[in-house]
Image (cartoon, grey):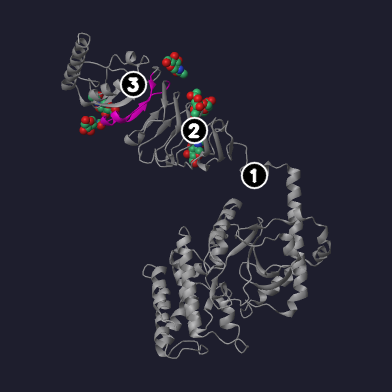
Amino acid sequence: MADSWPLQLLTFLLSFTLWGYSVAMSDDGRVLLQFRATLSSGGGDAALSSWAGGKGPCMDQNVSAWTGVYCENGNVSTLQLENMGLSGKLDLDILTGLLGLRSLSFSNNSFEGPVPDFTKLPALKSIYLSMNRFSGEIPDGMFSAMRALKKVWLSHNNLSGRIPSSLTVPTKLMEVGLDGNKFEGKLPDLRQPELRMVNVSYNNLEGPIPERLSNMSASLFEGNKNLCGAPLGVSCTPSKKLAPALLVGIILIAVKVLTLLIGLIGFLLRRRAPKGKTTTDKLQPGKSKRIEDLEAASVEKGSADHDGEKKKVSKKEQGKLTFVAEGRRKFDMQDLLKASAEVLGSGNFGSSYKATLVDAPAVVVKRFKEMNGVGREDFQEHMRRLGRLSHSNLLPLVAYYYRKEEKLLITEFVPKGSLAHMLHGNRGSTESPLDWPTRLNIVKGVARGLAYLYEELPMLTVPHGHLKSSNVLLDQSLAPLLADYALVPVMNKATASKVMVAYKSPECARHGKPSKKSDVWCFGILILEILTGEFPANHLTQGKAGAGDLASWVSRIASEERASPVFDKNMKGTENNEGEMLKLLQIAMACCETDDESRWELMTVLEKIEEIKGE
Ligand SMILES: *[C@@H]1O[C@H](CO)[C@@H](O)[C@H](O)[C@H]1NC(C)=O
Ligand SMILES: *[C@@H]1O[C@H](CO)[C@@H](O)[C@H](O)[C@H]1NC(C)=O
Ligand SMILES: *[C@@H]1O[C@H](CO)[C@@H](O)[C@H](O)[C@H]1NC(C)=O
Ligand SMILES: *[C@@H]1O[C@H](CO)[C@@H](O)[C@H](O)[C@H]1NC(C)=O
Ligand SMILES: *[C@@H]1O[C@H](CO)[C@@H](O)[C@H](O)[C@H]1NC(C)=O
Ligand SMILES: *[C@@H]1O[C@H](CO)[C@@H](O)[C@H](O)[C@H]1NC(C)=O
């Protein structure tokens, strides 16, 4: 008892004293005294002994008698507590009471633990925490609300993890100091116009230096694990790291493999093409293209001799196929070269071949030349993404082959061929034309496959991009399989806009780029083609027709419909189904609505189509 009362008295006196202050003192003064109480006494208290008495920190509008405190118009604007040997954890929550606070510095102290949470002080313009012992990771969103931030210095601490990507948010950012920590991963793509200093030297960073920083001094980036690009003299393409001799060797092997492949295909072409088993593009006036192809192949005449040499080439040199589909028997380039090949046709992108493998199902190999829209890594990632797709109305991608100049995409072979072939290629032949129930089923399957693509690839503006009857294949039961989908991201931009069907949409003519509803428009054209049995205008002119031709094709059909039914005269099974056929025709017309704003969403189209009754 006797021991404790002086302590109680002391506490009483102390609180009385603090109470005395708070009556007289400004809000800012009370906040600062509370904050001082949270600082560990490593001499800090002594350094801040001037924080006491009077009216508070801002005695005059812009002048303060308190150490490290700066005022502006009567409010504390800057707290600069540097070189004071302060230690412990730094908690800034109390400082949210300083409404005018714009700058904080605690450089060269001994604070430890995580970097304090700045999200509660979103008005700060500068933060200086260099030369402390802060450690751990900074939450990725730390800077996302800091609209006013100009300078952030965290140099020479013990910070790890990734540099927060939210550092790209503050638009006025000028200085960033992160040097002498343990940051890893990539540098966020900083591109603020006023940036003049970004020191990230001596960390464990990797990857490309953002372009905006490429004219800064190299010393700002040195001492990292794997940073590359300007201003460092390290190229970002991995091949550069290979010894030049090795590089030349690899190029030679690649050229040899390609020559072999072309030679072999050319050889097989000359041997087999006359038998005329080509199917898919038979009716398209693509003759000139095919001849071009044959010519190209025969120019390689000399290289056909390589066929004989083939066995001398070791397996390793044959180039590598990458399989993206699960559970399929793997084969390699050599198997492909050994397979008997048959040209299927030449589309706008390049030729495709059927390769019949020894003891494995036949595959289709499509060659793409204009497929350099993205670099190798992004290409591979996109192919893996396509490989994960699985739907009963999608033709799965089996494997691919990557070279900068050329890509091969390998899919299953579908014996029945394409819808284009079935609609237009068989007049007078043994196979009977598709009847109404089959055509309706095909439309439903295409709608479902398309809806699946929209769902699985929401990041693509046009998830299919090239929907037309020659890219709809039919399986044994005449169910549709979509092919050549989701290739827009990897195609060369110029080729995509010249060739791909989505780029023929009216909105492309208006704004120069497709919209989320461009695939719907292509689908409308496809339904009209299925109903009328007519080739749409652009297919007849080898994809060179613009949006105008297709649009006028649609309006011609619409005006003819007013006079008499436009349905394909060869279509059987139409008796008592005229009502449903008309419904589908109206859906097709709604899909072909010129104004994409008022055109239906794909999901609406799908619902309406599912409502149409089959047999
Ligand atoms: C205080 O400084 C601000 C600018 O920082 C200035 O606009 C203001 O006039 C100054 N006030 C006084 C009383 O000096
Ligand atoms: C850091 O602060 C200490 C006092 O705590 C001082 O002696 C030293 O010179 C300061 N270092 C720098 C680089 O300012
Ligand atoms: C100073 O603080 C008061 C509230 O304490 C606020 O109303 C005023 O806008 C502040 N002045 C400046 C310049 O921030
Ligand atoms: C830095 O942090 C690591 C843990 O991330 C710790 O092991 C190490 O002791 C720290 N170094 C210093 C100098 O504080
Ligand atoms: C960048 O940081 C490193 C390491 O802390 C330092 O040596 C260098 O002087 C800094 N560069 C500039 C331009 O300040
Ligand atoms: C770097 O380029 C930017 C423009 O991209 C320019 O504003 C800045 O002044 C340049 N910095 C240097 C150090 O040349």
Q: In the rendered structure, which amino acid carries the disc numbered 1?
A: Pro
Q: Position of residue 118 (x, y in %)?
A: 36, 34
Asked if the residue at label 2 sits under 8 Å from ligand 4, the reply is yes
Instruction: Give the Cα distance between marks 1 and 3.
Output: 50 Å
Along the line of sight, the residue nearer the viewer: 458 or 444:
444
Disc 3 element: loop
> Which one is in front in this view, the residue at disc 1 or the one at disc 3?
3
Residue linked to disc 3: 39
Disc 2 element: strand
Along the line of sight, the residue nearer the viewer: 410 or 299:
410
Along the line of sight, the residue nearer the viewer: 293 or 93:
93
Q: In the rendered structure, which amino acid carries the disc numbered 3?
A: Leu
Where 470 sits versus 308, above or below? below
| Quadrant holding the N terminus | top left
Disc 1 element: helix
Q: Which residues are the magenta region?
A: 86-108
